[in-house]
Amino acid sequence: MKVFSGSANLDLAEKICGAIGTPLGKATISSFPDGETYVRIEENIRGRDVFIIQPTCPPTNQHLMELLIMVDAARRASADRITAVIPFFGYARQDRKDQPRVPITAKLVANLLNAAGVSRVLTMDLHAQQVQGFFDIPVDHLYSMPVLIKYLRTRLTRKTVVVSPDLGGLKMASAYSQALGANLAIVAKQRKNATETEALYVIGEVDGCDVLLVDDLTETAGTLTSAAGMLKDRGALNIYAGVAHAVLVDLAIPRLQSSRIEELITTNSTPVRTVEGFKTTVLCVSELLGEGIKRIHNDESVSSLFKIESSSK
């Protein structure tokens, strides 16, 4: 087994290698003056089982192209099998034609990875489950929920309601509510544009309860902060946000700082920006992804990684 990393999240790659006891492979990644990416793998990988770790977080196109070039380099170096480890899969939200004359970019990215020479994909918390079906190669889809639940049980000690900030996240919120033994509620929203949403009404009772808002991804924090404001007005006590991928853009920073969210709990699937004056807790998913890599290498089942230990409460 050989593990390499792109430049998107080198810290996570090093922690994954530490968790599985394998040194991180040496590769040179640089850019030409015109912005073209240059990759050279500095080790012999002929006949090896190669894993390339690269979340496609911002700058998304650069990191995606870097991943494709690394895969091509490994394929031309006669690697036996190439697994793309993509903790955060960019473009996953463009998974359908919801308007005329728009692309299905998630399918395009799947085709690009396949064409480059990827043998299988290991990813985590896809925005939409159906993206797995866009690939003609095996996809192992992990969930950060066991990692988040372990921490949340230490924080949520009072009566808690798990809230989905939109209708699409209801299934995820239901899973969290069952794992935490909490009630369930939903915030219905409407999207004004790509960066703004408006919370319309709450389905469920949150008065006098701590609230956990759960979502797979936040970028502008518009959905979370809008929902938190409405929930606070409905009598919620402390409001926590649990998010698998915190890809925080500039617009999210002032929104979180002025929001009514007590704490944002996320993972290091992508590098997480520090928000001054706002509590952000970043949980490490290196052991989860490392165990997935080991099991793929050994041709073992990864389904047991989805199991959540029963609560000690």
Image: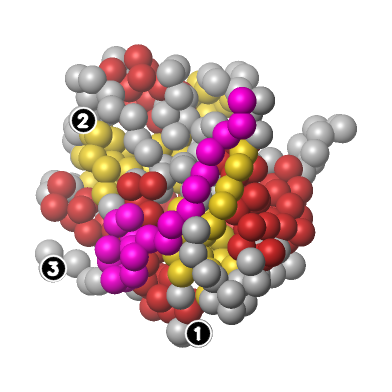
Q: Are marks 1 and 3 in contact (CB under 8 Å)?
A: no
Residue at 47% in and 30% down? 219
Residue at 56% in and 66% down? 83
**Mark 3: few, some, or many residues within 10 Å (few <14, many ≥20)?**
few
Q: Position of residue 141 (x, y in %)?
A: 52, 64
Q: Is residue 172 left or right of residue 75?
A: left
**Mark 2: few, some, or many residues within 10 Å (few <14, many ≥20)?**
some
The numbered mark, 1 or 2, whose residue comes first in the sequence reads 2
Q: Say whether residue 36 is visible.
A: yes
Q: Position of residue 78 (x, y in %)?
A: 65, 72
**Mark 1: few, some, or many residues within 10 Å (few <14, many ≥20)?**
few
Cα distance, mark 1 to mark 3? 33 Å
Q: Which residue is mark 2?
A: 279
The numbered mark, 1 or 3, whose residue comes first in the sequence reads 1
Cα distance, mark 3 to mark 2? 26 Å
Q: Which residue is mark 1?
A: 299
